[in-house]
Image: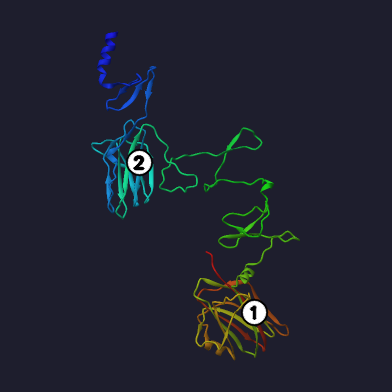
Amino acid sequence: MTELRKTVLTDLTDDLEINADGSINIRLGDGTTDVGVNTDGSLQSALRTKVCTNNETDTPLGAGGVFTGTPGDTFGYASVLVTVFTDVASAVDGLSIQFSKSDAPVDWHESDAYTIAAGAYKTFTFQPVDRFFRIVYTNGAAPQTTFHISVKFHSVAPKASSHRMGDDISGEDDATLQKSIIAAERPGTAGVYTNVQATNSGNLKVSVEELDGALLTTDDDDDTDIDGLDSVRAVASLYARIDADTVKPVRMDGSTHSLQIIDYDHHEIHSGSHYFISGYADLAINHVLQFTWQMPNTAKWTHWVWEISTEAEALWQVYEGGTITNPLANALTPLNNNRNSANVSGTTMRYEDHANLAGANGDVDISGALLIESGIAGAGKDAGFSDRGSELVLKQNELYVLRATATAAGFVNFNMEWYEHTDKD
């Protein structure tokens, strides 16, 4: 037995190292000291790390220059750690991490790619997806003055990367994929947890069933900032958008508790885009009170209603698409229903009292026009009245012709109102 021990020790002489404290190190074939035997007989262990010189460089690259490493063997290692620094931004996806199943012949495949920012000292870790590893780095449009890449193989996987809590995370940062399920304890059933669900669109499903009274606070004003609601005013509060950044609470009538609303055309009055004309004419029999009304060639369309009342019988007509032969004698300036607004109508209106129908047709040709509205107002001793309560949206860049023909002499009153609005579709 003693002779056997001597023989073994003799055969291992080149692979043994006796330390000053009497412990023994066993050398591996590559000459590194990985395993030692302590004086109490226990084994010493060390985590292995190897520098991959095949893929290191500190030589700056020219504009568009490329560094290509040579195969580094990752066998026996759990992770590859790459560190990069450059004073010039790389090309898009300039840092390419590639693996091959063999080194002869090589069959390189890219597993990851990153764009490196100028002045960034970046560290990335990768699992060896195949045995042989290399880096291909492509510089950006300017020559580098400082550049280095270092690579280490580790026997265990270190932490992927670290960030301060206050730092923004870039899409080029190293990251580890992690998926989680959110569960919450079911009310009234202690110890039973239910997975939180998502909507059909993939958003977190939320249902407010109760609200802690401590959350109810008083706001200093009626405005609420879209970017961060400054208070919770009430459980059932409704808010409506005023502009891109602000919403206001929808109000209720104190007496009836009904919502306070205004019609949309009333809203247009407040907005300063609601206009009107009104007036009267004393028409002799067979006279024709004629208007021409040109719509602007813009996406701001006219939404129109009107009223007409007559002392005696009169025929009224609305044509779409007439042609002006002679401009009518009188210009009409539409007035803004909001007298504080400086906005002006984009339409152009003129009028004239013609002695007969032939004179009206001589100034405005309606032979190719479309008659879209007509009627008789007034008969006998009774005064006449006609109106359109539903707004008519007039065609962009179209001419409209409005006529009142006196079947019997008498006064004609007219009132037209409209707002000019860009369609949201």
- Farthest residue, direction front: 20
Question: Within 10 angstroms of label 2, few (less than 14), some, or many (20 or more) residues?
Answer: many
Whether tag 2 and tag 1 are in contact, CB under 8 A, the answer is no
- Disc nearest the viewer among 2 and 1: 2
Question: Within 10 angstroms of label 1, few (less than 14), some, or many (20 or more) residues?
Answer: some
Counting from the top left corner in percent of width and height, residue 4 is at 27, 10
Position of residue 386 in the picture relative to residue 44 (left or right): right
Q: Residue at x 61, y 71 (%)?
A: 391
Counting from the top left corner in percent of width and height, residue 254 is at 74, 60
Q: Quadrant of residue 32?
A: top left
CA–CA distance in space, label 2 to label 1: 80 Å
Q: Quadrant of residue 314?
A: bottom right
Assign the N terminus to one quadrant of the image. Answer: top left
Which is more N-terminal, label 1 or label 2?
2
Counting from the top left corner in percent of width and height, residue 183 is at 57, 38
Position of residue 8 in the picture relative to residue 271 (left or right): left
Counting from the top left corner in percent of width and height, residue 232 is at 65, 52
Write down the residue under mark 2: 82
Position of residue 207 in the picture relative to residue 114 (left or right): right
Write down the residue under mark 1: 415
Is residue 72 shown above or below 40?
Answer: below
Which residue is more in the foreground, 107 or 15? Answer: 15
Which residue is more in the foreground, 63 or 175? Answer: 63
Q: Residue at x 38, y 42 (%)?
A: 123
SS label for mark 2: strand
Q: Amino acid at mark 2?
A: Val
Q: Amino acid at mark 1?
A: Asn
Is residue 126 shown above or below 385?
Answer: above
How are the colours assigned in the image?
rainbow
